[in-house]
Image (cartoon, rainbow, N blue to C red):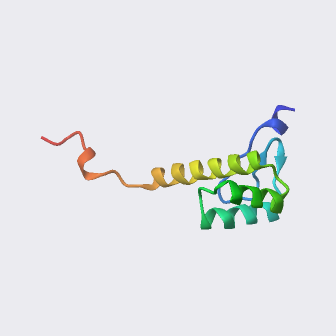
Amino acid sequence: GQRERASLREVGTLQVAMDGHRCGARRILALEAAFKQCPHPDETQVANLSRETGMTPQQIKYWFQTRRAQIKGSSSNTRPPTQGSSSSDP
């Protein structure tokens, strides 16, 4: 059904869906470790991860892109407002 086809993106869990398939915990751990070392992998790193995880290079690139967006989104939500952004300044 549609629920099976929906992509799940949950930060901090091992429930990540790519192309309708959940990634195994081992794959996620490998991807997370690689992400910590380099959030923008080059083609060689993508190819190595592809072989290591059994995922396609496109899936690896998509996972990194999504992970960067998740990190960016979660960090922008936790930042306090800057001092110069108040509209009540005279």
How far from the left and from the top, in percent, is residue 49? 76, 60
In depth, the one of 75 and 26 nearer the eye is 26
In depth, the one of 21 and 57 nearer the eye is 57
Check the image and report above or below for 2 versus 63: above
Q: Quadrant of residue 53?
A: bottom right
How far from the left and from the top, in percent, is residue 14? 75, 59
- Residue sitting farthest toward the left: 90
- Residue sitting farthest toward the front: 44
Check the image and report above or below for 13 versus 84: below
Rendered residue at 79%/56% (across/down): 50
Q: Is residue 11 left or right of residue 87?
A: right
Rendered residue at 63%/57% (across/down): 41
Number of numbered markers: 0
How far from the left and from the top, in percent, is residue 35? 64, 62
Q: Is residue 81 left or right of residue 7?
A: left
Check the image and report above or below for 86 versus 32: above
Q: Split into 4 quadrants, where in the image is the N terminus?
A: top right
Q: Split into 4 quadrants, where in the image is the C terminus?
A: top left
Rendered residue at 85%/56% (across/down): 54
Rendered residue at 81%/41% (across/down): 19
